[in-house]
Amino acid sequence: MTLLTIWDETDTTTPTVQTRDTDTIVEALTPLGVRFSRWELKELSANPTQDEVLEAYRTEIDAVNAEHGYTFVDVVFIAPSEDPSYAETAATARQKFLSEHQHDDDEDRFFARGSGVFYLRVAGNVYAVLCEEGDVISVPANTTHWFDMGTRPDYVSVRFFHDDDGWIGNFTGSDIATKFSTYDELAAVTV
Ligand SMILES: [Fe+2]
C-alpha cells in the first residue's frame, strides 16, 4: 500500500506524518499541486511490451492526455534478474534521479507494476510518497524533488510528457536526498 511520510527538512529522523490512508495522502499532496489517484490494475503478461501496457490502460491514458494536454507517453521497465548485468543497470538507473532536481515539465507517473519513492521538497518539508502498483502521481513542473527506485528496482511505469525533453533534470546541487530514509528503508516500514 502507498505510504506517505512527511518530515520537517531540519529533522530527518522523526516524521511529522506517516500514513497509508488515501484520503490523508490526497489531502496532504493537493496543496502542493500534486495529483494522486489510483487506477484499477489490468492483466499484463510477465514481461509486457510498451504497446501492451499502453493498450491495457488506453482509456485511462487518453483521459489524462485530454485533461492535462500531454502529447507523448512512454513506458519504462526494470525487472530484477540474476543476470550480472542487472546490478549495474539497476545502480545506474537508480543514480540518475537520486539527487535533488527539478524539471521544466510536469512529471506524471502511473505504476502498472512495482514501486518507487518520489520525494518532494516544498516549503521546508520533505514529502516521501512510496508509490505502489496502481498509483498515479503528478509532480508539478519546477517542484524540487528526487526519486528512489531502491537497490533492487522493479517497476513498469507509464510516463507522460508535454514535450520531448521534459524529463531532463536540472540538478540543484543539494545533498538533501542523502539525509532521508531510502526506498529500501521506507519499503520496510510496517505502519
Ligand atoms: Fe524527476
Image (cartoon, helix red, strand yellow):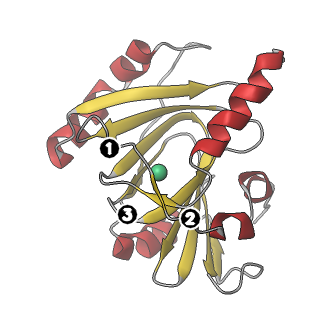
Q: Which residue is mark 1?
A: 166
Image quadrant holding the C terminus, namely: bottom right
* Residue at 29% from the left image edge and 39% from the top image edge: 161
Q: In front here: 145 or 40?
A: 145
Is label 2 in a helix, a strand or a loop?
A: loop
Q: Which residue is mark 2?
A: 173
Q: Is residue 187 above or below residue 12?
A: above
Label number found at residue 34 = 3
Q: Is residue 182 above or below residue 57?
A: below
Q: What whole-number distance in Å separates the C-alpha atoms at marks 1 and 2? A: 19 Å
Around disc 1, counting alpha carbons within 10 Å, would you say few (fewer than 14), some (14 to 19), or many (20 or more)?
A: some
Q: Amino acid at mark 3?
A: Val
* Residue at 38% from the left image edge and 49% from the top image edge: 107
Q: Is mark 2 within 8 Å of ligand 1?
A: no
**Could you say where residue 17 lies in the image, as x and y percent from the top left?**
63, 79
Q: What whole-number distance in Å separates the C-alpha atoms at marks 1 and 3? A: 17 Å
